[in-house]
Amino acid sequence: MSTLAVGAARTRVELLQFFRERDAVIFNLLFPVILLVIFGSVFDAELPGGVPFTQYFVAGIAAAGVLLTSFQAMAIELCIERDNGTLKRLRTTPMPPVAFFLGKIGQVLATTALQLVLLLTVAVLFFDVTLPSGADLWARFAWIVVLGTAAGTVLGIAFSSVPPNARSASAVVTPPMIVLQFISGVYFVVSDLPDWMLDVASLFPLKWMAQGMRSVFLDDTGWLQVEPSGSWQTTETAVVLVVWLVAGLVLARLTFRWLPRRHG
């Protein structure tokens, strides 16, 4: 079998394992939906430019959800598999390492797509969120999701070597994600954030993904005049995500470990 065929078979295995873990399914797939329901039910104010809060919030939480299923879930999952010996056993099989990672990437792409479908379905049916109307906006949505997922996945693979063991994985991986969500315009309106906070957030992909998602869901509204940059910066968004993707590939190649640290 070719490496791609083995990778496709491994994707099926990864998806089966994922859906057997009920806590992972609930957290990764439903967490953004739960946040939308909570925030959308509490905050019904109209933002500057005549934008409903839920229309703004769904853009930010969609971006955060992509990193949740890619970076955060991948880093924690690999820590657990490294600690319980799964990676060690897989490394001794004839399966090419590339096929293993293709399986992980395939699983992330599938779960990310499902999460976004659930999120947008709830947003439209229960919170009157308006979906993009043009093919160009959907195309922009697609490449933001693909680049964001790819960058988040390889960064998650690289970051999985940071926690010393599986017990500390969530404590090490989750806090950076929470901080980035607060300073990247997911929970707070981006125009209300101080400049220094936006400058820090600009160093990381989530801020650009959230801005890209706003360009998709708020393009037909009056929000652009409120955007701190004064433009959607779609080119800059693509460049930043590609840079992080390349950096993640390099870091993953240099830092990924098949064995726990205690094995040397």
Image (tube, rainbow, N blue to C red):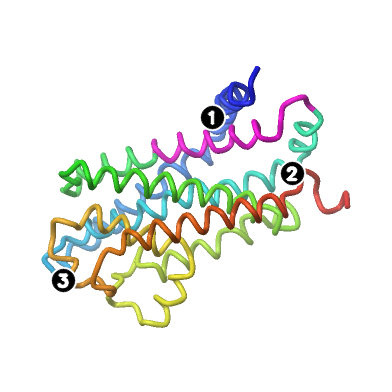
Q: Secondary structure at mark 1?
A: helix
Q: Secondary structure at mark 3?
A: helix
Q: Which residue is mark 2?
A: 82
Q: Earlier in the sequence, mark 2 or mark 3?
A: 3
Q: Are marks 2 and 3 in contact (CB under 8 Å)?
A: no
Q: Which residue is more in the foreground, 22 or 95? A: 95
Q: What whole-number distance in Å separates the C-alpha atoms at marks 1 and 3?
A: 42 Å
| Mark sitting on residue 48 | 3
Q: What whole-number distance in Å separates the C-alpha atoms at marks 2 and 3?
A: 48 Å
Identify which amino acid the numbered label 1 is placed on.
Answer: Leu
- Percent position (x, y) of residue 75? 61, 50
Q: Which residue is more in the foreground, 199 or 41? A: 199
Identify which amino acid the numbered label 2 is placed on.
Answer: Arg
Label 3 packing within 10 angstroms: few (<14), some (14-19), many (20+): some
Would residue 16 appear left or right of 33 to someone viewing this image?
A: right
Looking at the image, residue 261 lies above or below residue 199: above
Q: Quadrant of residue 164?
A: bottom right
Please give the range of residues in magenta: 93-114
- Percent position (x, y) of residue 53? 21, 61
- Percent position (x, y) of residue 143? 37, 46
Q: Are marks 2 and 1 in contact (CB under 8 Å)?
A: no
Q: Which residue is mark 1?
A: 15
- Percent position (x, y) of residue 225? 17, 71
Identify the image quadrant of the N terminus: top right
Q: What type of secondary structure mainly makes up the magenta span?
A: helix
Identify which amino acid the numbered label 3 is placed on.
Answer: Pro
Q: Earlier in the sequence, mark 2 or mark 1?
A: 1
- Residue at 75% over, 31% down: 90
